[in-house]
Every structure is written in C-alpha cells, then in structure tokens.
Amino acid sequence: MMDHAISQVPGTAASHAFRQQMSRFVEQSKLEKMFGMPGYEGYFAQSVNTLLESALREQKMPTQL
C-alpha cells in the first residue's frame, strides 16, 4: 500500500487539484513562486518520497527495546 502511495507522489504533486488544495494553506503568491520554479515539482516529489520511504523502512524494522 505504501509503495503504491510513493509511486503516486510525482503525479499528485504535479496535479492541478493538488495546487488547489495547497492554495488553502499557502498564500497564492508564495504558491506560484514555489511551483513556478523550474524543477520544484520534482524536488517536492522527491522530498516527500524520501520521507515516505524512510517511514516504510522504519515500519519494516523489528522493534528494538
């Protein structure tokens, strides 16, 4: 399930629907500045994927007490 979510991040980050949702939390000028930068969507998607992959690895590790 998490693998599927990770694979969907680039498409989600590039979608119009995602930007609309982000506009609820981020000022429009800042949103345009961030996502208007060449390569930002890729950077954002990679950052989110890195976090999700880290969480997935930790989830698979046996608990050490």
Image (cartoon, rainbow, N blue to C red):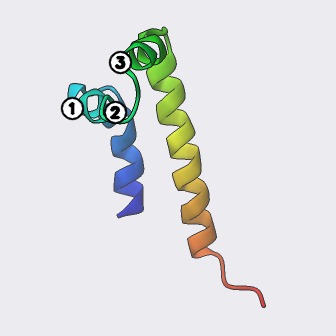
Q: Which residue is mark 1?
A: 17
- Residue 18: image location, x then y, percent: 28, 33
Mark 1 or 2, nearer chain start:
1
Q: Amino acid at mark 2?
A: Met
In the structure shown, which secondary structural element does the residue marked by tag 2 occupy?
helix
Mark 2 or 3, nearer chain start:
2
In the structure shown, which secondary structural element does the residue marked by tag 1 occupy?
helix
Q: Nearer the viewer, residue 18 or 30?
A: 30
Q: Residues within 10 Å of mark 3 (few under 14, many from 20)?
A: some
Q: Amino acid at mark 1?
A: Ala
- Residue 31: image location, x then y, percent: 41, 20
Residue in the picture at 27% in, 36% down: 21
Count every numbered label the image shows and give the total. 3
Q: Is residue 36 above or below residue 1?
A: above
For residue 15, side relative to residue 1 (left or right): left
Residue furthest to the left in view is 17
Residue in the picture at 42% in, 49% down: 6
The answer to which image quadrant residue 53 occupies is: bottom right
For residue 46, side relative to residue 3 (left or right): right
